[in-house]
Image (tube, rainbow, N blue to C red):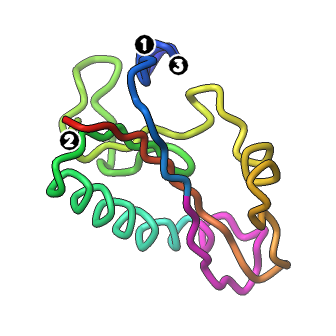
Amino acid sequence: SLFVGSVKMCIRDSYTDMLFFSSVADVADLMDMEESLKTKAEHEKMTGIIERKMKESGLEVYTLSSDSCALCGKCAFPKAQCRHPDQMHPCIESHGIVVTNLAEKLNMDYYMGEHLLLWFSMIFFRQA
């Protein structure tokens, strides 16, 4: 991907483990994109907390999350570098990882009905 680089460049082959998790948000209408996207903030907050705890325990991490990064009102890229690289979580699928396939392989729920939305994150980690 132009924005995040190739899978091999981003993840490298040196991460030994990966944590893949999801959160569930209740929405009135799954097809209402505005309502659905508003629920992403809580998932990103949870992802940041887990990422921080892993770093505090001495792990080096590389974090991916659902959908595109939405930290800034207007992204600086491609005119400038990311303003918050320490907080930015690229989209899982921008790295060539198909979330639905991975969720199925790991026997995780992907669809839970028309009023529940699942957000996913993936944290690659290794000893620092």
| Residue corresponding to mark 1 | 9
Contact between marks 3 and 1 (CB within 8 A): the answer is: yes
Pointer 1 local density, CA inside 10 Å: few below 14, some 14–19, many at least 20 = few
Mark 1, secondary structure of its residue:
helix
The image position of residue 60, as x and y in percent, is 24, 38
In the image, residue 53 above or below residue 26: above
Question: Hey, what amino acid is under mark 2?
Answer: Asp
Left/right of residue 83 with respect to residue 109 in the rendered view: left
Question: Hey, what amino acid is under mark 3?
Answer: Val
What is the C-alpha distance between the residues marked 2 and 3?
19 Å
Instruction: Name the quadrant containing residue 24.
Output: bottom right
Quadrant in which the C terminus appears: top left
- Range of the magenta residues? 21-36
Residue at image position (79%, 60%) is 107
| Residue corresponding to mark 3 | 7
Tag nearer the camera, 2 or 3 = 3
| Residue corresponding to mark 2 | 86
The image position of residue 73, as x and y in percent, is 32, 49
Residue at image position (14%, 56%) is 56
Mark 2, secondary structure of its residue:
loop
Pointer 2 local density, CA inside 10 Å: few below 14, some 14–19, many at least 20 = few
Residue at image position (51%, 71%) is 38
